[in-house]
Image: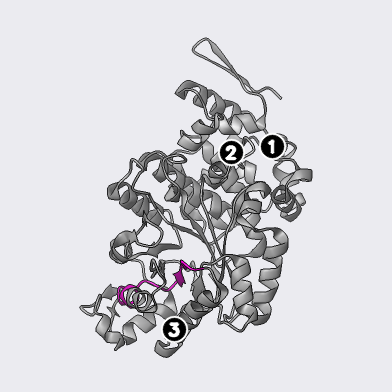
Amino acid sequence: MNFSCSLRNDVYQFDSVKDVLAKASEEKSGDTMSGIGANSSLERMAAKYVLSEIHLKDIYENPVIPYDTDEITRLIYDDMSQPIYNEISSWTVGELREYILSHTTTGSDLKRLSRGLTSEMISGVAKLMSSIDLVLASQKMKHQAHCNTTIGEPGRLAFRCQPNHPIDNPSGILASMKEGLSYGSGDAVIGINPNNEAVESVREILSMSHEFIQKWGIPTQNCVLAHITTQMKALEKGSPVDLMFQSLAGTQLANEDFGVSKEILDEGYILMKAKGTSTGPNFFYFETGQGSEVSLDAHLGVDMQTLEARTYGYARHWNPFMVNNVSGFIGPETLYDGKQMIRCDLEDLFMGKLHNLPMGIAPTYTNHMNSDQNDQEIAGMLTTVAGANFYMGVPGGDDVMLSYQDTSFHDDASLREMLGLRPLRDFEKWLEEMGIMENGRLTKAAGDLSIFD
């Protein structure tokens, strides 16, 4: 394979598929810090040109992390359709891009195509796309899933009500939960990040949230975002678990740092089928984000975007209900500013959808990033246009437990209103019965917690 290109009388030579993928990435501080990103805009352009001419067969035969040493690589390859791959193996990455963006290619076409693609192929084609390309391609793909409610139906936009509290105070959690619900947030899930990961503490939050949902007849699902093994212990002790959570990464090495493996995820899935309190068949909630492998020094010389694509290839094995991207969560050591954050959100939504996943986006940023609320709102609007399934709902947009900025309950309502989107079907009926919503718009009851007295 020829990995060289001449631009302005300079020859750019790349070492491997992995090197081309890294150098073709848009600028990200994490790749720069790792010493694998392009050294100039010209080198980046040369890498994109070389990447556009690489055949899918070349990528297939050269995974960025070998099959024998990484269970994520093995799962991606073992799960893909060989007959579909054989149909397209002679395509170049450039031809794959043209096919995806063609006005005659439908979402159904892409759903079938996805089964013959490795995650590296999906990462590669995303690197050749502009922001408008990513939005246009993402719009074509719509993926539904069902836990207690159905997410991803056309014309619907859901939100996770995230009533975190820095000391897990039950009254504080309940107050935030009521506020979020009063603004129409919570149809995706009522998901609480615990401060205390002790099993009994997690059990208390699970029971409290489940009892509140049952008392008010709310069509949604509960989730406490403790480590999967803690949730499994709570479930085995009889706690009500509608949706099981876990953070995932794109290398086996990083997942080992997370304390997770295919074996543990399989065990959790089987346990949810047997003892979980939701209807299913989609029982998992995964969170991912570009940069986790870099922050753990577990990237193995692979660029952040490609590792994120591999995370999606791993996640799709368990047919999750929700996959949430939180790329701006770490800080400037992985994404320096709002521009990098916005690009990541668009890339990740597209790549997740091309893996046939029900994707949501959390356009997050930390206060030590060179980013602000304007960047976040732009990312939210762009990814809503691109067809994200859900967003977070955080009181005031400021997570007091995790110390980062995310979409607020008010942002949630605005995104729905500006694009004429509705809550999930059963949840909208509940909002109307509670007097919170009428004809798709919030009423004066929005923000009034006394409706739950």
Query: Label 2 is placed on what type of residue?
Result: Gly
Mark 3 or 1, closer to the camera: 3
Residue placed furthest toward the top: 9
Give the total of numbered labels. 3
Q: Quadrant of the N terminus?
A: top right
Question: Circle 3 sits in a helix, a strand or a loop, which is it?
Answer: helix
Which tag, 3 or 1, sits closer to the chain's start? 1
What residue does disc 2 label?
Answer: 124
Residue 322 locus on image (x, y percent): 53, 64
Query: Toward the viewer: 108 or 420?
Result: 420
Mark 2 or 3, closer to the camera: 3
Query: Toward the viewer: 90 or 37?
Result: 37
Q: Are marks 1 and 2 in contact (CB under 8 Å)?
A: yes
Gap in angstroms between the C-alphas marked 3 and 1:
48 Å
Magenta stretch encompasses residue 226: no
Query: Label 3 is placed on what type of residue?
Result: Ile
Kindly identify the residue that appears in the image at 59 percent across and 33 percent down. Answer: 21
Residue 243 picture quarter: bottom right
Kindly identify the residue that appears in the image at 39 percent across and 88 percent down. Answer: 216
Kindly identify the residue that appears in the image at 66 percent across and 53 percent down. Answer: 256
Residue 130 locus on image (x, y percent): 45, 38
